[in-house]
Each structure stands twice: as structure tokens, then as C-alpha cells.
Image (spheres, grey):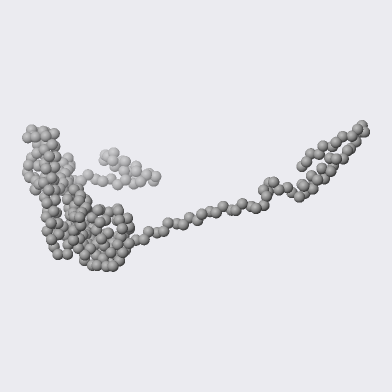
Amino acid sequence: MKKISFIALAALFLTGCSSVKKVEIVPILPDFIMANAVDSMSYALGVNMGTDFAKNLESIPGGKSNIDLIIKGFSQAIKKDSTLLQPEAAQEYFRNYITAEQTRENEGKKAAGEKFLAENKTKQGIAVTPSGLQYEVLQSALGSRPQATDKVKVHYTGTTIDGNVFDSSVQRGEPIEFALNQVIPGWSEGVQLMNVGSKYKFYIPYNLAYGEQGIPQANIPPFAPLVFEVELLDIVTPEPAPVVEEVKQAPASSSPNPSKKKNKYIINIEIFYQKLEKTKFFDNDNSYVNNTIYRL
């Protein structure tokens, strides 16, 4: 009689229970390369780790890493062999290296941006504000100018100084609305120079844009001057605040207080009883008494 494994029995049990979902048993992959399953798993793990590590290597500054020495250090550490650096020293060296290389790269980016702006401001048609913002008028108009707290509607395209587009409402085919006090300083200052219907090109220094950090997720490097081509479509008029009507108090009644106004019937009754008070009645013993009247 053939032996039935525990896993197979479990699968049969689950299949027979209508109240339990059917579980698909995934078979173990064959020993596709190595001598046994453990060796095959070990190799697969190495492939996975190497693939992920290669992606991380691309973000390390300072040029191409030495793969052979990476493998050597990894091999010695994972086998617990003697290494040239202790783990703590290796971590400190790596951190110091990354910091130094990032500083060097950022200084190079900052110098490149300053050189670009210095050369750009000498070109014909370029104006420079006291803050360092540079702009040129691509299309004039006679519309209104927005104020610092106004909400505007614009079309724009933003690029780095090497021409890489990182954002564009034009490409999306949909203009955007925003308040001028909620954007980077270069935008706020620049758009206030524009008239509705005009189109400007702004060259914004890094300190009026996204600063020393940049936005790497949006492909904006640290210390990056930015170039924006902006068309001012409209100044968005805020919706008027809802009018709350004052609830007027009803005028006071000119008539006497109703609670103090006596009913005509009650007044007649009182007069009647007042007359009765003056009347003397005899009791059973022929003596007379004044009848006390209790008014309603």
C-alpha cells in the first residue's frame, strides 16, 4: 500500500470540507541547477540579493564600484572569515565616504547652476529682480496683475537647466489653479509681474525654488536652478461669502400685557360680588354675618 503524505491528507480533507476554501498545493520546484533543493534555494537567494544590490549600487555616488572587492568583502563576512575591517569600522567608513561624495557632487551642481544664471542674465531680453529672479517676456498682455494672496489659473512647463521636463500642465492638457502665497518664492514673485494673458519665462535660483535638498522624487536635484515657462490665464475670483440675513426681533406689542388684561366676564363677576359684600344675611340662629366672597 502506498504511503500518503501528511500534506496530501490535509489537501484531501480541505477539499472535502465545503465550509473551508480550497487550498492549492504548490509543489516544490525541481532541482533545476544544483544537486539538491537546498543548494538550488541558496543559489536563487544569491540571485535575488545580487539583483537588489545592483540596483542600490546605481545610487552610490563617486563612480562605478569595484564589484570584485564587494564580492570579496561579502564572502569573507558571510563565512565569518577574517576581514580587513571590523563591521563597525566598515559602517563608519561607508557613511563618511557617502557624505563626502554627496558634498562634492552638490558643490559641483551648485557651481554649475550659478554659472548658468550668470551667463543667462547677460542675454538680450533677460531682466533680473533684486532677489535674483530672472525672467523674459514671451508674450505681453494688458490684463490685470495678481496680488500676493490672489488665486491664479495658469499653464506652465518646468525644466531643469539641462532641459529635462519634470512637470507640465501643458503636457497634461489641464491648467492649474493655486494661491500665490502657497508656492515657491520664485513663482510667487514672478507671477505677480505678469498681466492676465501674458506668457513669461522664469529662471529661478535654487534658493527661490527647492533649496539645497531639491526633490529627488520629482527629478529636481539639490541646488538646482529651475526654468518655468508660464502663461497667466486668469485671476480666480473667490466665491462670495454667503450672506447671513439678520433676524429682526418682532416689535413689542402696543397692547397691554395679556397676562395683566382681565377678561370682561371676570370683571363683571367681580362687580357682582362687590355688591354682594354689602348685603347682610342671617344665619340659622338669626344672627347676621358678613358673607366673605372668594373671588375666582
Tell whether 268 sits left or right of 155: right
Seen at 18% across and 46% down, the residue is: 30
Residue 162 placement (x, y as % from top left): 14, 58
Q: Nearer the viewer, residue 173 or 37?
A: 173
How many numbered discs sit on the rendered protein? 0
Q: Quadrant of residue 92?
A: top left
Seen at 28% across and 67% down, the residue is: 142
Q: Residue furthest top?
A: 285
Locate the N terminus and report the quarter of the image it occupies.
Answer: top left
Q: Nearer the viewer, residue 174 or 50?
A: 174
**In the rendered image, is residue 32 in sight?**
no
Residue 185, above or below 123: above
Seen at 31% across and 43% down, the residue is: 11
Seen at 81% across and 39% down, the residue is: 293
**In the rendered image, is residue 248 in sight?**
yes
Residue 59 placement (x, y as % from top left): 15, 48
Q: Quadrant of residue 284?
A: top right
Residue 246 placement (x, y as % from top left): 51, 54
